[in-house]
Amino acid sequence: MNQVKKDELILLTIKRLGINGEGVGFYKKQTIFVDGALPGEIVEVKIVDAKDKYATGVITKFRQKSPNRIEPKCPYYEKCGGCQLQHLSYDCQLEEKKNIVVESFSRYYDGKVEKINFKDTIGCESPWRYRNKSSLPCRHDGDKVVVGMYASNSNHLVYINDCMIENENIKNTRDYILSFLSTNNIDVYNPKTKTGSLRYLVIRSFGEDDTQVTFVLFKEDNKLINVIKKMNLKSVFYSINSDPKSVEIFGAKLINIKGKEAIEGKLGDLKFKISPKAFFQLNTKQTVVLYDEIVLE
């Protein structure tokens, strides 16, 4: 079998999207994954990693772009690893998500796939400003306390001032907190030296009166806790996660500093009391749409 090698340059036609939004093509019967490539595109690709059955590559040049390719709305999209398909029109995103489900059934389902009625993906009224929770690492950028998102497949943190899929209450709350913390010269965690205090900022919001903030610390810090107590926030917690290798955000303990121990989330006519560690659907409007669809069935 003629396999591609690392650093090899190839010409590739993208056939479909993979489950992580990457473009998928085939070269000499070998599967090639290419981030940022769309179905129908013809791209020149440099191989960056080659395995026995598959390889990954990066686009070096477009020979033919998809008519469904659009300019991403988010200014951080090219660097931030949070979103994968902003360069594809929303209608086509919905179509491709359905195709991914069909492809998965074709590969793993033992029955007759052609007998399954695959329905179209139900889209959001708006794919922006829907998310009701944000969990972001904190860092120092000069004298300022900032937050960011990790770049794709990397430990590099991309500092961001806004996220286009978070609701406005989260953005406004975070702006207020970061400004307050910066003014008070608080100690922020440094993952390289494993020193400092503030590690993550977790915000969940269903409205101004139902916004909950959790400060995740690397160690006890009375100065930071006293600064937090002075903030004009309705529901505030802190947690300590002292394990530098932990992939979890919260530590074992969760302490209510001030305000409500739970905020109220709604799904249609149903009301829920939400604590910081509780699971709740991130897109409440779309959750109701999907639940109603199931009920109608």
Image (tube, rainbow, N blue to C red):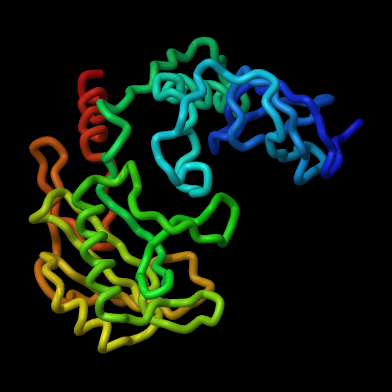
| Image quadrant where residue 9 sits | top right
In the image: residue 193, left or right of residue 221: right
Quadrant where the C terminus lies?
A: top left
Instruction: Identify the residue at image location x=58%, y=34%.
Output: 36
Instruction: Identify the residue at image location x=56%, y=76%.
Output: 192
Is residue 166 visible from the viewing direction of this image?
A: yes
Q: Nearer the viewer, residue 239 or 193?
A: 193
Residue 7 % position (x, y): 83, 43
Instruction: Identify the residue at image location x=64%, y=20%.
Output: 41
Instruction: Identify the residue at image location x=29%, y=44%.
Output: 131
Is residue 1 visible from the viewing direction of this image?
A: no
Residue 229 % position (x, y): 16, 78
Which residue reaches farthest top? 115
Above or below, 102 relative to 274: above
Q: Nearer the viewer, residue 32 or 185?
A: 185
Residue 286 % position (x, y): 26, 32
Which residue reaches farthest right? 1
Q: Nearer the viewer, residue 63 or 81?
A: 63
In the image: residue 230, left or right of residue 63: left
Residue 63 % position (x, y): 70, 21
Which residue reaches farthest bottom? 222
In the image: residue 280, left or right of residue 76: left
Above or below, 214 relative to 101: below
In the image: residue 170, left or right of residue 217: left
Above or below, 38 relative to 202: above
Above or below, 140 relative to 276: below
Quadrant where the N terminus lies?
A: top right
Q: How many marks?
A: 0
| Image quadrant where residue 210 sits | bottom left
